[in-house]
Image: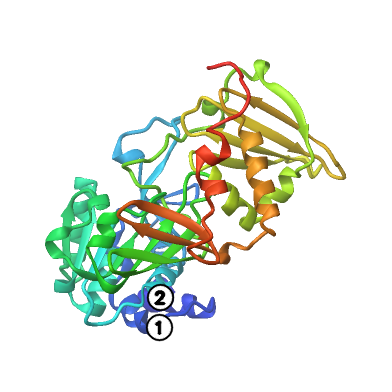
Amino acid sequence: MSSPSGLLEILREKGVVLGPWADAVTSVPRELFLPDEIEVGEELISRATAPARWLEAAYSDVSVTTQVNDGRPAGPDAYRLPTSSSSQPSVMLEMLSLLEVQTTDRVLELGSGTGLNAAWLAHRVGPSRVVSVEIDPVLAEQAAKNTLAAGLSPLVVQGDGEQGWPAGAPYQRVIATYAVATIPHAWVEQTAPQGRIVAPWGGSFFPYSFAVLDVQDGRAEGRFTGYPAFMRSRNLRPARGFLDDFLHHRDRADSTTTGLSPLELAQDPDALFYVGLALPDAWHLPVTADDGSGELTLWILADDRTSWACADHTPDGRRYAVAQYGPRRLWDEAEAACRTWEALGRPSRDRAGLSVTIRGQQVWLDTPEHRLDALTDRSVRGGSGSGGGSGP
């Protein structure tokens, strides 16, 4: 099963919609796009010492990490931030299905990574119709070598994906393989009329949506779908690390209680999406107790590491303990956003949409006229935080 045909069978058994991409899956060997040392989850796999396991991973429907910490050496106890990967094939196919590529389309890809997605695109529309932009010069060079080894040669260039690649415009299809909080208008400008943009979208709190946008008259508009987990744009990538890297002055935190269940918030993707509109610069981390008690702590941590909050869920509780520290009261912000979502009738994410113009982007509910300023505009919400608190 450790072969392109084996991968195709795995995808079919999972019910993945292959559409016109089945031939690309079987014709472009994934192993040509992977380095000899890879990671799957927390497992490190060496082709030299475990060739069968390495090949099994290559042809499984899993995401394979191919670079950590931007390629810099990391000590054994250092935090390992994945910075490039070969995405899960079923997720790649989901994106390509949303993109609705036609054989006559010119395609711009932002984020070459290993080059596999660009190779699939080149296999479908022809290498001369695909441009792939990679910010990391080492990865760009390797992606070009990988696609050539597969018998394909799309144009792989080193550059800032946020700027697109105007020399090849216009493109009928634009696809990003990293998550962005804001759709650059350069992508809209370089997309042909009636073209389409597909990109993982969202801020730090909830970057787990595909934005599927159609372009007309210098404006991109569409809705959200899927639950992808992609790496963030390197240009605006927030700091990440161990939980303790974000916690400080725990003895000086303010203690309160809340009636909002942290467990219910952590488990409701619609709530998380709308709360995420209000907290694009903070991330959340649910930590479940490992003693079988059913207890959970929901951490909310500011990207700039100046503020943090946590709320503790206990089974059968009606009030939950909250601790907050820093110039922002992050739990208060999250709870206020959740109450706004509830006041709107607890809409599902698929009722939200996104418009992108030269003036910026705007999230709306049901129609572009119903802007969600109460969640996205900090001036409406009263600034970035309420209450005092000590600095770090």
Indicate the position of residue 70 as horizontal and vertical percent values.
31, 40
**Whether label 1 touches label 2, CB < 8 Å:** yes
Amino acid type, mark 2: Ser
Left or right: 339, with 15 as reference point:
right
> For residue 230, which quarter of the picture?
bottom left
> For residue 53, which quarter of the picture?
bottom left
Q: Quadrant of the N terminus?
A: bottom left
Which mark identifies residue 350? none
The residue carrying pointer 1 sits among few (fewer than 14), some (14 to 19) or many (20 or more) residues within 10 Å by Cα, namely few
Residue closest to the eye, 317 or 167: 167
Residue at 66% from the left image edge and 35% from the top image edge: 332
Indicate the position of residue 363 as horizontal and vertical percent values.
48, 56
Q: Is residue 56 visible?
A: no
Q: Note whether 341 is above or below 215 in the view shown.
A: above
Q: Is residue 129 visible?
A: yes
Q: Which residue is mark 2?
A: 97
Helix, strand or loop for disc 1:
helix
Left or right: 285, with 150 as reference point:
right
Which mark identifies residue 19? 1
Amino acid type, mark 1: Gly
Q: Note whether 332 is above or below 122 in the view shown.
A: above
Indicate the position of residue 152 as horizontal and vertical percent values.
18, 71
The colour mode here is rainbow
